[in-house]
Image (tube, rainbow, N blue to C red):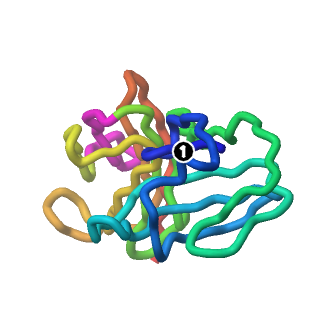
């Protein structure tokens, strides 16, 4: 049996250590393993925020908490680590493309950081610029909407535009088509 208060650090315990006495815990069985989560402490009337893991259980008792009658201990399943996409031309894109009125620019980041987004017309003139500071970005997928208006809030014409995103010491360039 294992116990965790954060889901990533686990401590091996015995069945008699299921403490404090609790009510209204959530119990679930997954792959022949019992998981007990949270509950309400009978002794001091407070909420309990922990997780108990009973691997390889073949039976459980009745009452307010599970009594493990037979269990073969094994290492708990590790909490999955989210996969963060690389900042590259495959994972940076906008949609819909082509667009009529707005497009969502999508890009992944491995760390919070400053990001600069620039849209150029086909002659290389800057049409729209957006600077995101570190507090405006997050680890993982980030999105920002461009409403197909220039920096002076004038709707841009039909045509092909270049999207450049500067982040993670790289520059990714993509094409945006506007068809109204």
Question: Badge 1 is on which residue?
Answer: 3
Q: Residue at x 68, y 61 (%)?
A: 67
Q: Position of residue 43 (x, y in %)?
A: 32, 65
Q: In this view, does 61 lie above or below 35?
A: below
Tell me where residue 98 appears, x and y as whole percent: 54, 66
Residue at image position (28%, 43%) is 125
Secondary structure beneath label 1: strand
Where are the magenta residues, as a range?
A: 112-126
How crowded pointer 1 is (Cα within 10 Å; few <14, some 14-19, many 20+) is rated as many
Q: In this view, does 163 lie to the left or right of 31?
A: left
Name above or below for residue 14 compared with residue 25: above
> Is there any visible trace of residue 112 in the rendered image?
yes
Q: Where is residue 167 in the image (x, y as percent from the top left)?
A: 36, 31
Give the quarter of the figure containing the C terminus: bottom left
The one of 148 and 53 positioned closer to us in this rendering: 53
Q: Is residue 179 visible?
A: no
Q: Residue furthest top?
A: 169
Which of the two residues, 165 or 109, is positioned nearer the viewer here?
109
Q: Is residue 65 inside the magenta stretch?
A: no
Find residue 57 and report its horizontal and vertical position in percent: 80, 55
Residue 123 among those drawn in magenta: yes
Relative to 151, does residue 163 appear above or below in the rendering?
Answer: above
- Looking at the image, residue 160 sits to the left or right of residue 147; the answer is right
Marks counted in the figure total 1
- Looking at the image, residue 90 sits to the left or right of residue 137; the answer is right
Query: In which quarter of the view is residue 83 placed?
Result: top right
- The residue furthest left is 152
Query: Which residue: 48% across, 55% down?
Result: 176
Q: Which residue is drawn at 66% across and 44% down?
A: 1
**Camera-side residue: 92 or 138?**
138
């Amino acid at each position: 049996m294992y116990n965790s208060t954060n889901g990533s650090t686990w401590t091996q315990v015995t069945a008699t250590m299921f403490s404090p006495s609790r009510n209204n815990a959530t119990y679930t069985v997954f792959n022949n393993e019992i998981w007990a989560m949270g509950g309400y402490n009978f002794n001091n009337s407070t909420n309990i925020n922990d997780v108990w893991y009973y691997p390889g259980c073949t039976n459980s008792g009745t009452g307010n908490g599970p009594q493990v009658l037979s269990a073969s201990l094994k290492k708990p399943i590790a909490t999955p680590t989210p996969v963060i996409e690389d900042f590259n031309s495959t994972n940076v894109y906008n949609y819909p493309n082509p667009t009529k009125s707005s497009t969502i620019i999508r890009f992944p980041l491995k760390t919070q950081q400053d990001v600069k987004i620039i849209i150029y017309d086909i002659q290389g003139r800057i049409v729209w610029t957006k600077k995101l500071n570190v507090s405006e970005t997050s680890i993982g997928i980030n999105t920002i909407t461009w409403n197909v208006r220039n920096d002076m809030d004038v709707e841009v014409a039909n045509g092909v535009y270049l999207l450049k995103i500067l982040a993670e010491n790289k520059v990714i360039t993509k094409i945006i088509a506007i068809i109204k």
